[in-house]
Amino acid sequence: MLGAVVVVFWSHVVLQGSYGLRMLEIQVPPSIMRGQPIMLNCTFDLEGDILYSIKWYKNNVEFYRYIPSDQTPGQMYPLKGIYLDSKFPHGPSIYMHKTDLTSEGTYRCEVSAEAPYFQTVMDEKELRVYVLPDRGPTIIGARSRYSIGDTLNVTCMSGPSKPPSFLEWRVNDEEVEHNKITRMSPLRHPDGLQSSMLGLQLHVLPADLRNGVLSLKCIAFISKAYLTTKNEIVATNKPKIAENHATVSHDGPIITGGRLRYAEKNVVNVNCTSVKSHPPAELRWYINDKEASRDYLRVSNPIRFPDGEESTVLGLRFTVQPRHFQRGEMRLKCVATLFKVTNMRSEEMVISSRQESSGLTVVINRNGFNSVHTSSIKLWITVFIAIFLHYR
Ligand SMILES: *[C@@H]1O[C@H](CO)[C@@H](O)[C@H](O)[C@H]1NC(C)=O
Ligand SMILES: *[C@@H]1O[C@H](CO)[C@@H](O)[C@H](O)[C@H]1NC(C)=O
């Protein structure tokens, strides 16, 4: 039994009774643009019960409580990223007139009924906040001159965004062998946005020039979250393992290496692997619903598939302390966010040898806005740098 994993399907946590209060759904959009107002709805069926309270939480912290029998039925508790409109009659729905990056998180709605059953039901969903980059990717580190046989070493950097853009290099419009690509961690800006970075190292060889031209293109895929899925391990520190009803969320990320029981000073060493997608999914680990500290995370290389899709792998490693258990339980949750590409931007650098000038020209083409659906506006900024090629 050691090494076994108990995975609990978390999409709906519903206390089921044969009658009475029933949770239907919490309606939370998967992603919103930073600043955008939102209305979240909690839909439930009282089925004859009397409503006692509706409570709203973000990342397990209560920010609003509605108790119709109270003199002031609505209570707001200030919380970072929550901007409740004071004029809106909150309750089963809440309205935020604005949002920011800290509005992101897990939203939960908890509904309780009055006596005699005092039933409580809840549901939760993830909200992601995205910010589009205000500029396309840039190729940096290009030298002013290259000779045949030189090593070209350039980096593509995307404009700051959230999530960071997914970058890809194409040489002569073809995919590049992985040994020529250097993956780098994204650049984190103080405002919470990130710039992706992807390096390319290439020996400039005569065979690379197609009709005298070598083209290097960096493509940035800009995306927004459209789905979050999760899976969870529930471990105990008790000598006897509690009976866990285990079900697996099939589209959720896969957790491996987990155990059913951990004692103090044991090392938790688990991996979470997302389903394959393009762009690759983003993974996050939570310990008892609190996002795991960055020191606990182990970033691995993604698994690449022949069709170009990737599976992200994120490890979680830490030494168990008593504080990691709540009521004898430690819940390790892995949340995968899947993205849909909304548009693409690219920058191209062309190295060409021209017979007339018996030289080599570097051209940088910057594609401004390039929507996936409508190949609309193309903004070409062309810079010509003439450099001389030294034939040996
Ligand atoms: C909540 O309900 C309102 C009114 O029916 C609707 O406009 C809004 O889109 C709903 N919110 C979500 C996240 O579905
Ligand atoms: C490429 O350039 C980066 C810095 O821009 C440097 O760290 C790296 O070592 C270089 N790689 C090669 C193969 O020259």
Image: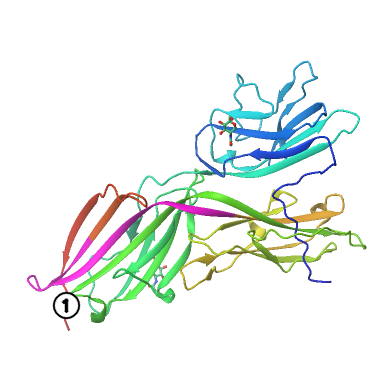
Residue type highlighted by circle 1: His
Quadrant hosting residue 235: bottom right
Q: Is residue 267 magenta?
A: no
| SS assignment at label 1 | loop
Describe the colour scheme in one phrase: rainbow
Question: In this rendering, does residue 141 appear at all?
Answer: no
**Point 60% across, 18% down: residue:** 87
Taking depth in this image into account, of 94 and 392 the one nearest to the observer is: 94
**Point 61% across, 27% down: residue:** 84
Segment colored magenta: 337-363
- The residue that label 1 is drawn on is 390
Q: Main secondary structure of the magenta part?
A: strand
Taking depth in this image into account, of 26 and 253 the one nearest to the observer is: 26
Q: Where on the image, by quarter, is ligand 1?
A: top right
Q: Position of residue 153 (x, y in %)?
A: 34, 69
Q: Position of residue 65 (x, y in %)?
A: 74, 28
In the picture as drawn, the residue positioned furthest to the left comes out as: 356
**Crowding at mark 1 (Cα within 10 Å: few <14, some 14-19, many 20+):** few
Taking depth in this image into account, of 269 and 225 the one nearest to the observer is: 225
* Quadrant for the C terminus in the image: bottom left
Q: Would you say 382 lies left or right of 61 here?
A: left
**Point 54% across, 27% down: residue:** 97
Quadrant hosting residue 268: bottom right
Q: Position of residue 209 (x, y in %)?
A: 23, 76
Q: Position of residue 331 (x, y in %)?
A: 77, 55
Q: Is residue 21 above or below residue 218?
A: above
* Quadrant for the N terminus in the image: bottom right
